[in-house]
Image (cartoon, rainbow, N blue to C red):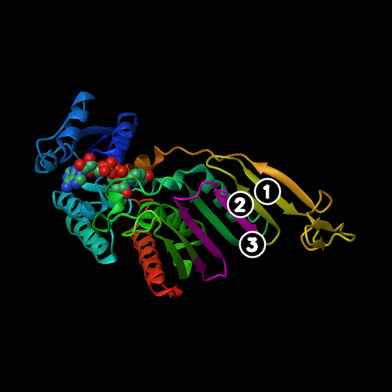
């Protein structure tokens, strides 16, 4: 099948990532880029990438069927709607936009113009997340009680637009959207009941530079999503607790370690000696009542993102990241902001 021609607006860090992937894609080809910064345009020219004269010039290119918006978050809506009104299908970088009203205007523009619109939830292809989803869905260690998902760094917020509220900065919008989307993919977008969130403002007073968000689901399960940018010792990437065992992924792309309980009651427990005394409750299990194994990383190819979306455009089938999913992801983020402000649990 003929490759779909894709143009990129915003040729910074992520625009560059899209360009690289499109150049290696088997379903798409890079038509060119537009960026308001001359230095970014020069960079593209130096790599033999076509640079349009303006955004209007890009949108006037009739060979372009799909536009990828990879600018800071505050201009996603404006640029996406311009492209949708020009009859282009659109991928908008995450977070798709900053409010539900803004998202609804983007969806309405897509529907009005009979074209497709989606956002780039590329971390649905992360192997660590896929491994956790597999443990959850298989039920091999019983019903999942909670999953903790953490990303810890120590360098604060990158020193760019992410430090400012007006551009949609802060970690909830930046990383939160990925980790929330992963949790809702596991527990169900229609299952969110309420959220509670606390945030840090340690290196930046204007936007959150870390947060801990608890999401309560209607079936009683819970997810904790935590981003830290002042953590010099990182906690495990994923920790999953189920009725009959525990699963953990220590770091990105590591195998999953599973400890499965094979017999609840152990008989004679040998107490463990702690500083202040003996405890049987916290004594470690042995191999007589547990089985320990690892699950290798599942196969994943992030090129499937463009493959699936282009296929959905061409065949009129459902896209991976649906309007309802985008809306729920954003609603959870906005409820988290409300929870930070009010110090309360916020129902969705
Ligand atoms: N999906 C992911 O994994 C991922 C990773 C990083 C960033 N992102 C997202 O990608 C987007 C861009 O982030 P980034 O890190 O590449 O930022 P960046 O600052 O590196 O690049 C943004 C580029 O957009 C250009 N720009 C700004 N306004 C513009 C306009 N009106 N028209 C044309 N160009 C414009 C800037 O000149 C800059 O070159 C953000 O929404 C961010 O959240 C997604």
Read off the magenta span: 215-241
Label 1, label 3: how far apart the Cα atoms are: 14 Å
Q: Secondary structure at mark 3?
A: loop
Give the percent coordinates (x, y) of residue 38: 14, 35
Q: Is residue 59 found left or right of 302 in the rendered image?
A: left
Residue receiving disc 2:
135
**Total tally of numbered discs in the picture:** 3
Q: Residue at x 24, y 25 (%)?
A: 47
155 or 1, which lies in front?
A: 155
Residue receiving disc 3:
143
Label 2, label 1: how far apart the Cα atoms are: 9 Å
222 or 106, which lies in front?
A: 222
Q: Is residue 108 visible?
A: yes
Tell me the quarter of the picture where residue 58 sits.
top left
Tell me the quarter of the picture where residue 41 sits.
top left
Q: Residue at x 29, y 35 (%)?
A: 16
Q: Which mark is residue 319?
A: none
Q: Are marks 2 and 1 in contact (CB under 8 Å)?
A: yes
Position of 294 relative to 226 (above/below): above
Q: Which mark is residue 258?
A: 1
């Amino acid at each position: 099948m003929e490759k779909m021609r894709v143009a990129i607006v915003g040729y910074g860090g992520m625009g560059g990532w899209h360009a690289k992937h499109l150049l290696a894609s088997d379903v798409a080809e890079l038509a060119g880029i537009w960026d308001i910064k001359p230095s970014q345009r020069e960079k593209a020219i130096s790599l033999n990438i076509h640079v349009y004269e303006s955004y209007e010039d890009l949108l006037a290119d009739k060979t372009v069927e799909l536009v990828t918006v990879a600018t800071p978050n505050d201009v996603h809506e404006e640029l996406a709607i311009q492209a949708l009104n020009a009859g282009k299908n659109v991928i908008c970088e995450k977070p798709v936009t900053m409010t539900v009203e803004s998202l609804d205007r983007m969806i309405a523009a897509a529907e009005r113009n009979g074209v497709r619109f989606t956002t780039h939830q590329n971390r649905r292809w992360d192997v660590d997340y896929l491994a956790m989803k597999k443990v959850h869905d298989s039920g091999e260690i019983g019903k999942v009680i909670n999953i903790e998902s953490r990303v810890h760094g120590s360098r604060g917020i990158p020193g760019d637009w992410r430090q400012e509220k007006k551009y949609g900065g802060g970690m909830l919008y930046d990383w939160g959207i990925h980790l929330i989307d992963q949790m809702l993919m596991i527990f169900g977008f229609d299952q969110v009941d309420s959220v509670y969130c606390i945030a840090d403002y340690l290196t930046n007073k204007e936007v959150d530079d870390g947060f801990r968000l608890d999401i309560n689901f209607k079936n009683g399960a819970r997810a904790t999503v935590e981003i830290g940018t002042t953590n010099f010792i990182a906690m495990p990437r994923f920790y999953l607790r189920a009725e009959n065992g525990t699963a953990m992924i220590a770091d990105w792309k590591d195998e999953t370690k599973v400890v499965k309980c094979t017999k609840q009651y152990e008989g004679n427990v040998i107490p463990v000696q702690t500083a202040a005394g003996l405890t049987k409750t916290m004594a470690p299990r042995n191999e007589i009542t547990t089985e320990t194994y690892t699950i290798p990383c599942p196969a994943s190819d992030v090129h499937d993102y463009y493959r699936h979306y282009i296929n959905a455009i061409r065949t009129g089938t459902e896209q991976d990241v649906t309007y309802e999913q985008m809306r729920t992801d954003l609603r959870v983020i906005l409820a988290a902001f409300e929870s930070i402000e009010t110090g309360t649990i916020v129902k969705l």
